Image: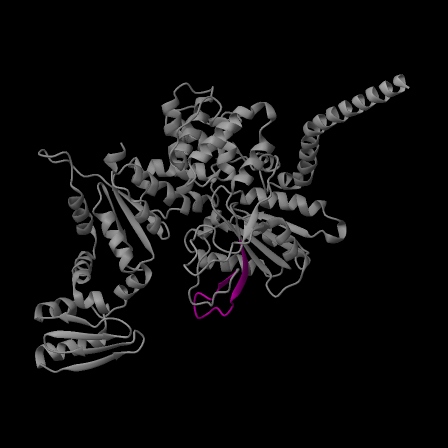
C-alpha cells in the first residue's frame, strides 16, 4: 500500500514537472511561432513594397492591443462634466464598425505621436486575416506617407466589397500645404470603397467650425462654393497608456532575466507621473536603461539619450560628433524635401552624395540594427521613427540653419521646440506654452550682434527688433494701446458704439444702446459711458477726446475681432508674457490669426 502511494506521488511530481517545463518551452516557442505566422500574413505587403521589413518586424513583436475612447485624451473636461471616460477595446470597436452597415462609412482613428498607429494598422490586418472566413473583410492597407499612395488606393478592382485602411494622414506630404483640401481629395479617391478607415495625429485633422458637432463624430464641410459634399466621420482616440498597460508591455517585451531593467523603467515612470509614456518610448527604454539609473526630466532629454545611445554603438564611424551632425542635417533635408520627394525618405545615391559633401562615411552601413535610419523595400532610406526625425529637425533649426525657418512645424515638432525654449529660459512658461501648442507653429531664428557695454540684447530690444521687421508694426502698436483702453477692454471694437461716441464727444449728444446678446443697457454721454448689466454691478467708464481718438484709429475690419475670437484676452496676456521673456518671442500670423511664429535668438543654442 505504501509502495503504491509512493508510485502515485512520484508520478504526480513527474507530471507537474513536465507541465512546468512544457509551459516554459511554450513561453519561448509560442511567440516565435506567432511571429512567423504574422510574418507570413504580412509578406505580401513587403513583396509589393507597401511596407518595409523594418516596420513589419517592429510591429509583429509582442503586441499590447490599445484601448480607445470618444473624447479627446488630453483635454480637461468642463466643470460640470463628471462622466467617467469609457475606454473600450479598439480592435473590437473596429470589428463592429466593419461588420455592421451604418449610415457613416468613414472612421477616424486619432492618436498622439508614438502611440503606435502603424503597429495597430498592421496588427488589425493580421487580426482580420485570422477571423473565421465568413467574418473576414477584404482590407486594402495603404500608408499615406508613401509617394505611391494614390496609385495603391486606385489599384484594386473590387472596391465595393473592400475596406480601405489609410495609415498616417499626418505623414502625407501633400497634406502639408492644405489639410482640408487633401482630406477631401483622399475621400473622393476612395468613394467606391465599402468603408474607409483613416489613422492620423490628434491635431492634424482639419476642424470645420461651421459644421454642427456630434459626440464621437467629426464633420468636414465644403471648402468653397463649387463643392457641395459634406463628409461625416466616426471618431475614436487612442487612450493614453496607464500603469497596467505599461506593465503589460514590459512583461511581454522583457524576459524574466531582465527584471532589473524593468524595475529601473517602472521606477523612472513612477517618479515622473506627468510625463506621457507611450509604446515608442517604452521600446527605447529597454536600451537606454541597461547600464544605470537615469535622471531624465523631459521628453527632449529622452530623445537625446536615444540618439546618443544609437550613435555610440555605431562601429563604422569613430568621429561621433561628426556623425551626430550628419544625421541632424539629414533630418532637416528629408523633412524639407518631403513634398518634392513625395515622402519622408532619401534615395541611396543622394544619401551617398550628401555623405561625401558633408565629409563623413556613407550612413547607415548595411545590416546595422542600431542605426537611426533604415532601408525601405524600395531601396530608399528613412528614419526609424518619424518623431526621431522631428526631434533632430528641431535641433538643426535652433542651431541656426536658416533653411529650416518659416517651415510649418508638425505637432510633435512644436512640442519639442516649446520644451527646448522653456528649458533654456529661467522663467517657468509651461502654462503659456501649453496654450500656444494648440496653434500652427512656425519658427524663425535671429542673429543679433552684441553691444560692447552689455552681455547681449535685452528682451524688450529683441521684441522691438522683431516688430520693426513686421510690415504691420503700426497695427501691433495700436493693438497694444487698445488693450489698455477701458472702452475697448469692455466692448471690443463696435461700429455702433464708435458712431455714438463720436456724437457724444463732438456734438454733445447722448445716446442709448441696448446690447441684447450681452444683456447690457448702455448710456453714452459726453464724458462717460454708463453700463447696466443684468445680475451684475453697474459699470462706469470715464472718457475724453484722447481716448476716443485712440479708439477711432482702429480700421473698419474684422482682423481684431478674429484675433479676439481665436485666442481671447487671456491669450493676449499669455502672449505678452512670452514676449517679455528672455531670448525669444512669439507673434501671431496677422493674416489669419490661426498660427504663430516663434522668433528666437539662435546664439543662445550655439
Q: Which residue is rendered at x = 11% and y = 70% of the image? A: 543
- Position of 447 with respect to 142 (left or right) is left
Image-quadrant location for residue 50: top right
- Position of 346 with respect to 26 (left or right) is left
Q: Quadrant of the C terminus?
A: top left
- The stretch of residues the image draws in magenta is 217-236
Depicted 550 relative to depicted 381: above or below: below
Q: Where is residue 494 in the image (x, y as percent from the top left)?
A: 23, 72
Nearer to me, 450 or 29: 29
Nearer to me, 550 or 81: 81
**Residue extending farthest front:** 1
- Position of 386 with respect to 135 (left or right) is left
Q: Position of residue 593 (x, y in %)?
A: 31, 58
Nearer to me, 352 or 321: 321
Depicted 236 relative to depicted 417: above or below: below
User: Does the magenta-highlighted stretch encompass residue 385?
Assistant: no
Q: Which residue is rendered at x = 50% and y = 65% of the image? A: 214
**Can the viewer see residue 315 in this picture?**
yes
Q: Where is residue 359 in the image (x, y as percent from the top left)?
A: 37, 25
**Can the viewer see residue 383 in this picture?**
no
- Position of 270 with respect to 594 (left or right) is right
User: Does the magenta-highlighted stretch encompass residue 223?
Assistant: yes
Q: Position of residue 373 (x, y in %)?
A: 48, 32
Amino acid at each position: 500500500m505504501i509502495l503504491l502511494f509512493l508510485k502515485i506521488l512520484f508520478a504526480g511530481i513527474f507530471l507537474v514537472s513536465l507541465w512546468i517545463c512544457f509551459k516554459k518551452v511554450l513561453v519561448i516557442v509560442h511567440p516565435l511561432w506567432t511571429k512567423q505566422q504574422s510574418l507570413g500574413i504580412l509578406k505580401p505587403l513587403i513583396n509589393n513594397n507597401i511596407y518595409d521589413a523594418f516596420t513589419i518586424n517592429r510591429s509583429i513583436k509582442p503586441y499590447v492591443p490599445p484601448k480607445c475612447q470618444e473624447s479627446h485624451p488630453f483635454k480637461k473636461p468642463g466643470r460640470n462634466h463628471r462622466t467617467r471616460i469609457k475606454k473600450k477595446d479598439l480592435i473590437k470597436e473596429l470589428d463592429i464598425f466593419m461588420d455592421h452597415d451604418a449610415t457613416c462609412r468613414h472612421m477616424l482613428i486619432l492618436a498622439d505621436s508614438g502611440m503606435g498607429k502603424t503597429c495597430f494598422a498592421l496588427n488589425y490586418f493580421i487580426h482580420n486575416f485570422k477571423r473565421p472566413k465568413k467574418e473576414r473583410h477584404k482590407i486594402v492597407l495603404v500608408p499615406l506617407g508613401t509617394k505611391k499612395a494614390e496609385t495603391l488606393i486606385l489599384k484594386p478592382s473590387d472596391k465595393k466589397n473592400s475596406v480601405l485602411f489609410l495609415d498616417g494622414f499626418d505623414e502625407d506630404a501633400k497634406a502639408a500645404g492644405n489639410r482640408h483640401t487633401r482630406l477631401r481629395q483622399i475621400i473622393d479617391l476612395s468613394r467606391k470603397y465599402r468603408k474607409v478607415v483613416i489613422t492620423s495625429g490628434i491635431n492634424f485633422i482639419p476642424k470645420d467650425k461651421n459644421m454642427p458637432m456630434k459626440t464621437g463624430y467629426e464633420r468636414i464641410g465644403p471648402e468653397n462654393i463649387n463643392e457641395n459634399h459634406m463628409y461625416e466621420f466616426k471618431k475614436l482616440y487612442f487612450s493614453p497608456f496607464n500603469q497596467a498597460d505599461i506593465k503589460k508591455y514590459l512583461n511581454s517585451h522583457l524576459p524574466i532575466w531582465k527584471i532589473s531593467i524593468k524595475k529601473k523603467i517602472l521606477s523612472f515612470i513612477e517618479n515622473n507621473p506627468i510625463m506621457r509614456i507611450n509604446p515608442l518610448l517604452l521600446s527605447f527604454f529597454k536600451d537606454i536603461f541597461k547600464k544605470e539609473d537615469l535622471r531624465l526630466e523631459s521628453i527632449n532629454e529622452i530623445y537625446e539619450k536615444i540618439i546618443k545611445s544609437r550613435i555610440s554603438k555605431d562601429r563604422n564611424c569613430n568621429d561621433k560628433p561628426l556623425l551626430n551632425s550628419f544625421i541632424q542635417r539629414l533630418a532637416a533635408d528629408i523633412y524639407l524635401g518631403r513634398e518634392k520627394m513625395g515622402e519622408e525618405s532619401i534615395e541611396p545615391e543622394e544619401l551617398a552624395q550628401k555623405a561625401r559633401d558633408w565629409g563623413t562615411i556613407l550612413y547607415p552601413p548595411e545590416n546595422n540594427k542600431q542605426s537611426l535610419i533604415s532601408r525601405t523595400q524600395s531601396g530608399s532610406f528613412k528614419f526609424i521613427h518619424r518623431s526621431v526625425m522631428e526631434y533632430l529637425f528641431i535641433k538643426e533649426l535652433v542651431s541656426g540653419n536658416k533653411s529650416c525657418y518659416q517651415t510649418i512645424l508638425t505637432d510633435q515638432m512644436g512640442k519639442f521646440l516649446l520644451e527646448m525654449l522653456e528649458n533654456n529660459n529661467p522663467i517657468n512658461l509651461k502654462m503659456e506654452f501649453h496654450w500656444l501648442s494648440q496653434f500652427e507653429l512656425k519658427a524663425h531664428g535671429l542673429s543679433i550682434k552684441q553691444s560692447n557695454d552689455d552681455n547681449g540684447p535685452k528682451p524688450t530690444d529683441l521684441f522691438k527688433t522683431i516688430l520693426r521687421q513686421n510690415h504691420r508694426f503700426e497695427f501691433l502698436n495700436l493693438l497694444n494701446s487698445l488693450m489698455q483702453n477701458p472702452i475697448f477692454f469692455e466692448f471690443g471694437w463696435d461700429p455702433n458704439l464708435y458712431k455714438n461716441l463720436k456724437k457724444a464727444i463732438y456734438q454733445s449728444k447722448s445716446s442709448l444702446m441696448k446690447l441684447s446678446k450681452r444683456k447690457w443697457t448702455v448710456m453714452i454721454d459726453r464724458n462717460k459711458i454708463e453700463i447696466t448689466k443684468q445680475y451684475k454691478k453697474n459699470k462706469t467708464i470715464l472718457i475724453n477726446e484722447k481716448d476716443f481718438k485712440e479708439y477711432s484709429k482702429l480700421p473698419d475690419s474684422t482682423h481684431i475681432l478674429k484675433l479676439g475670437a481665436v485666442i481671447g484676452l487671456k491669450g493676449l496676456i499669455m502672449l505678452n508674457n512670452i514676449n517679455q521673456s528672455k531670448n525669444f518671442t512669439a507673434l501671431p500670423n496677422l493674416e489669419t490669426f490661426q498660427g504663430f511664429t516663434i522668433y528666437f535668438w539662435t546664439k543662445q543654442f550655439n
